Amino acid sequence: MTALGPALGFFIGVICGLAVLLLIRTARASRATLKTTVAEISQLLAIPTFSFGGPWVTSTLLRGANLDAILPSYTVSLSLSFAIVAGFPLFTLIVVTCGEWRKGGRQS
């Protein structure tokens, strides 16, 4: 097992977790319009592309690495670091949103 998989997974997991936290913060602070909602959804949909490296990791950084050997440890460390950074805020957002839906409206 190479140390590249866990290190890269941790690094990209932390970056993706911070990106999700910034998007949550922006979504809670702004008024929801169709334009802002579509922009936030498109930003959230771009995170998996980055988290799995996009084209820059496989074409530039890992040109000579064995991807089959790196991928399992990379995926585990990415998942754990993302969950540590963004897990509790995402859980809290889900609980608050469900509570607002139960009450029948959005609280400001």
Image (tube, helix red, strand yellow):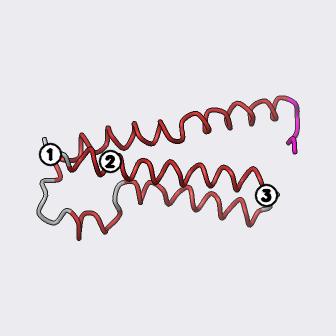
Q: Which residue is mark 1?
A: 2
Q: Mark 3: which secondary structure?
A: loop
Residue nearest the observer in this picture, 8 or 51: 8
Q: CA distance from mark 3 to mark 2?
A: 31 Å
Q: Which residue is mark 3?
A: 30
Near mark 3 (Cα within 10 A), the count class, few <14, some 14-19 or many ≥20, is few
Percent x, y for residue 73? 24, 40
Q: CA distance from mark 1 to mark 3?
A: 44 Å
Q: Is residue 67 above or below residue 92?
A: below
Q: Mark 1: which secondary structure?
A: loop
Q: Which residue is mark 2?
A: 9
Left or right of 49? Residue 85 is right
Q: Assess whether mark 2 and mark 1 are in contact (beta carbons under 8 angstroms).
A: no
Left or right of 12? Residue 97 is right
User: For the residues carrying marks 1 and 3, which lies nearer the camera in this image?
Assistant: 1
Q: Magenta region, mostly helix, strand or loop?
A: loop
Q: CA distance from mark 1 to mark 2?
A: 12 Å
Near mark 1 (Cα within 10 A), the count class, few <14, some 14-19 or many ≥20, is few
Residue type highlighted by circle 3: Ser
- Which mark is first along the chain, 3 or 1? 1
Q: Is residue 26 above or below residue 104?
A: below
- Which mark is first along the chain, 2 or 1? 1
Q: Residue at x 54, y 55 (%)?
A: 19
